[in-house]
Image (spheres, helix red, strand yellow):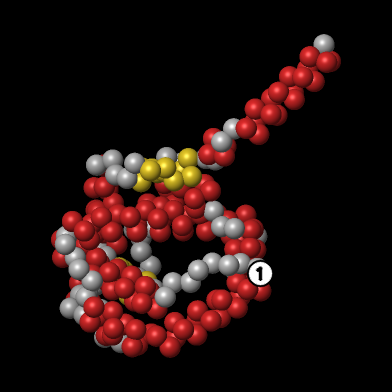
Amino acid sequence: MIRYLSRFMVAFFILLLSMPTHAQDTLVATLFGEDIRLSDISPSDAQLNEMAKMNSASKDMALAQFRHGRLAETILKKITEDYASKQNLEIDSELVEKFKEKFGPELAASRKESDERKENVGEKVPQKSIDDIATEQVRHWQVNKALYENFGGTVIFQQSDPQFPVQAYETLLKRYQKEGKFEILNDRYSAVFWEAFEPPFSFQLSADQVDFSDPWWLTE
């Protein structure tokens, strides 16, 4: 009997080790037919240690914050890219150059500091070029403008986005969700994701404060 159990346990562990990694990885969401698993939205050990240290937080808290943020970032990036394509939005190269003129030196200094910090923790992560960052920011503003013009609704102030059309984003996301373009399967992740688009909001702008005539970096 003991010999039988021993053989069974050996066979069990061999089977477990031979299982594909994704079978042991929790499915969190689907996006345009592709799976998003915990491993897709998790930091490296070096990143986690650095985040916990910088935020004076426990690793568990830093891990949760990173995963929720990365999931939202992944979903929003894919959906806004699809929306921009359907709206035939083309990147305004003039705005890209103006963004670089204003923030180029600051971004270069920040990138150098980030590179040094990653080197200290043994992390090798490719940094985005200033051109890439400028292009992303212009695209983001153009999408915001199009969303507000199409859907209207509440606009809020965020430190990284002075005019964020939060209600228009919620409308767009609900539409994509209804069409089956994405689904968050984990209740906890779903609750945190949608909470960001629901009132009450800390800094809601009045209608006369909303103006998408020019990007925020040209009006400061």
Left or right: 100 in relation to 63? left
Residue placed farthest to the right in the image? 2
Residue with the most extreme top position:
1
8 left or right, relative to 167: right
Q: Quadrant of residue 151?
A: bottom left
Q: Position of residue 145 (x, y in %)?
A: 21, 69
Q: Quadrant of residue 45?
A: bottom right
Task: Look at 18% across and 56% down and name the residue there.
Answer: 86
Residue 16: percent from the left, percent from the top? 65, 31
Q: Is residue 140 above or below residue 8?
A: below
Quarter where residue 51 is shown: bottom right
Question: How many labels were placed on the picture?
Answer: 1
Residue 56 at x, y percent in the picture:
64, 68
Disc 1: CA contacts within 10 A as few (<14), some (14-19) or many (>=20):
few
Question: From this viewpoint, is residue 91 visible?
Answer: yes
Depicted 63 relative to depicted 207: above or below = above
Please give the residue where the numbered disc 1 appears in the rendered image: 121
Q: Relative to 51, does residue 33 appear above or below in the rendering? A: above
- At a point 56% along the width and 81% down the height, the residue shown is 113
Q: Does any portion of residue 157 appear in the rendered image?
A: no
